[in-house]
Every structure is written in C-alpha cells, then in structure tokens.
Image (cartoon, rainbow, N blue to C red):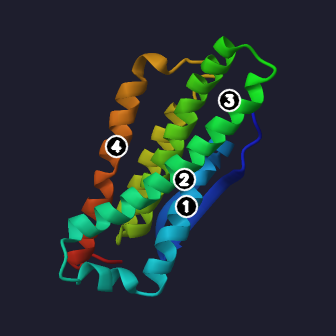
Amino acid sequence: MQEPVISCEHLTHFYGKRKIYEDLNFTVEPGRIAGALLALSQWIPEIQRKRLKLTLHLPYSQTGMLAMITVYGLVALTVLFGLQALASAWAMGTWVPAELVTHILRTMAVWYLAGWAAYLFTSALCLEPTWRMRVVLLLVAAGALRLMFLSGVPEAYNGFFPWMFVYVLLSGGLLFSGVARFKEGLQD
C-alpha cells in the first residue's frame, strides 16, 4: 500500500460557535490528488474573485455554462491520464510482456476513474454554498473514493467498472444542485 499524499486526523470545524463536525479523519491516496487539485485550481479563483456570480448572470444557460466548464476539466484530466497511460504502456512494453501491460492498464483504469470522481466531488464542494451540504458531500466523496481503493488485487474492479463509471458521471449532477441552492440564496 502506498503512503497517502494527504492525511488529516481528528479534524474539528466550527462555524462561529456552532460545531460543524468533530474528529474527522481522512487520507488522500496518490491517484486521487490530480482530480482534486485540478478542481481546486479551476474553481477557487472563480469563487474568491466573485466571477462565479457573473458567470451565472450571463445571457447563456447556467446549466450549459457549468457543463462546459466541467467538461473542460474532465477533458484536461483525460488528456493528462491518457498521456500517463501511454507513457506507462510504452515504458513497460519494452521490458514486460504485452499481456501483463494490458492487465496493469486495466488495474490503473479505476485509479483514473477515481481522479474523475475526485474532480467532480471537489468541484461540487467548491460550488456548494451551505456548510451542512458540504459536510454531507465530503462524507459521500470520502465513501465513494474509498470504494475505489478497497482492494489491492489487480483488476478487482473489472466486473463492476461500468457501474462505477456511470456512478461517477451521475455524481456530476451534484454540481448543479449546489449552484441551484446558490441561486436561491441559500448561503452560510
């Protein structure tokens, strides 16, 4: 098992005098960090500089605008992951039999899917206006990402990889629900 990139233990958060959560523990494995970092670098400037409010008031469909920004991030991740997979296949292909390279790439596919999930969940967390829902999203994200790293057995997820893929794509809907709450004025 690899050493986690990020490890938080016994985290407690207060919003004013109100305790939001207590004794939260989580780790971020190496495969999950790319999606989270891309989402943070994409959404934090939008939120800090109040450009998201402007974006949502443009004479263009809010859903279309948000979908376009999200698809851009997913395409960027896909290009990054594709280049990594090609480089890995090329490098391994010179020393390892082709069958083994195929098995390794199939094992890596779930890690790339975890990167997509981390991107979508982190984006949803950034766009969520209420702390209560952020905590719920954080717990759902931690659980979903944990499921993608439960087994150390190669190709353990091949049987239900298509279902995981569909679940990750559907989790993109969380972005739209957060923006809808933002538009309704539900902010902490």
Task: Say which amino acid is labelled 1.
Answer: Leu
The answer to whether marks 1 and 4 mark residues whose Cβ atoms lie closer than 8 Å is: no
In percent of width and height, residue 15 lies at 47, 75
Q: Image check: 89 left or right of 12? A: right
Q: CA distance from mark 4 to mark 3?
A: 26 Å
Q: Secondary structure at mark 4?
A: helix
Above or below, 73 against 140 in this view is below
The answer to whether marks 2 and 4 mark residues whose Cβ atoms lie closer than 8 Å is: no
Q: CA distance from mark 2 to mark 4?
A: 14 Å
Task: Say which amino acid is labelled 4.
Answer: Leu
Residue linked to disc 4? 169
Above or below, 103 against 111 in this view is above
The answer to whether marks 3 and 2 mark residues whose Cβ atoms lie closer than 8 Å is: no
Q: CA distance from mark 1 to mark 4?
A: 17 Å
Residue linked to disc 2? 35
Residue linked to disc 1? 38
Residue linked to disc 3? 89
In percent of width and height, residue 165 lies at 39, 34
Image quarter in which the N terminus is found: top right
Query: Nearer the N terminus, badge 1 or badge 4?
Result: 1
Q: Quadrant of residue 90?
A: top right
